[in-house]
Amino acid sequence: MTDSRALPVAGLLLAAGGGRRLGGRPKALLEHRGRPLVEHAAGVLRAGGCARVHVVLGARAADVRQRARLDGCLLVENPEWAEGMGSSLRAGLDSLADADARAALVMLVDQPGIGPEAVARVLSAYRDESSLVSAAYDGVRGHPVLFGAAHWAGVSAAATGDRGARGYLGEHADSVALVECGDVAEPYDIDTEADLAHLE
């Protein structure tokens, strides 16, 4: 069995959003289990098998750097974070270009119901630079998503506004390997005040 930690796959955590529907509270700084959510999510990527983790910051990036323990992560600041998730995905993929990575496993900071088990399952489906893998929940595509390096240029070109890679994945649906994770993870988002009930 291949040791996933030896694979040339970097974790890419998108954590730049300003939390507009949360009264302007950046999601990265929301508390979960006593620590900032961004710290929890970076730990999930590591525990799931991503030896290298790049974290894209935006809203209140200086506060995130000060409050969250992100030692060992490469922190990437996205000055265009207010444009939406697409700009953060582009910034994150750009940061991997010089990192000797062959694939990126992308995770969103506001999905604490997704843990290391789901990350490990998606990571285990990596084959080469042409890999395109997505977690699925009852057969429906979700996060995390793994993009082999052969897809990065196309993903970046399609990543606009808040759409991220949705359009690209839709266009290449026949090539996406779906990995069922519904038995080990819950793909809810922390988007509204009501969603804060999911945090511990």
Image (cartoon, rainbow, N blue to C red):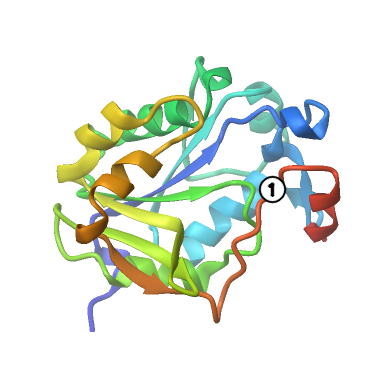
Horizontal and vertical percent position of residue 43: 56, 57
Lateral position of residue 97 relative to residue 135, left or right: left
Q: How many marks?
A: 1
Lateral position of residue 40 relative to residue 121, left or right: right
Which image quadrant for residue 33? Answer: bottom right
Secondary structure under tag 1 reads helix
Q: Quadrant of the N terminus?
A: bottom left
Residue shown at 78%/31% (left/top)? 25
Residue shown at 63%/45% (left/top)? 38
Q: Which residue type does callout 1 highlight?
A: Leu
The one nearer the camera, 191 or 40, is: 191
| In the rendered image, the vertical position of residue 127 relative to residue 60, given as above or below | below
Horizontal and vertical percent position of residue 52: 38, 50
Which residue is the extreme one toward the bottom? 1
Horizontal and vertical percent position of residue 100: 20, 43
| In the rendered image, the vertical position of residue 179 relative to residue 14, given as above or below | below
The one nearer the camera, 83 or 54, is: 83
Lateral position of residue 75 relative to residue 35, left or right: left
Which image quadrant for residue 164? Answer: top left
Circle 1 Cα neighbour tier, 10 Å, few/some/many (<14 / 14–19 / ≥20)? many
Q: Quadrant of the C terminus?
A: bottom right
Q: Which residue is mark 1?
A: 37
Lateral position of residue 71 relative to residue 23, left or right: left
Horizontal and vertical percent position of residue 37: 69, 48
Residue shown at 54%/21% (left/top)? 81
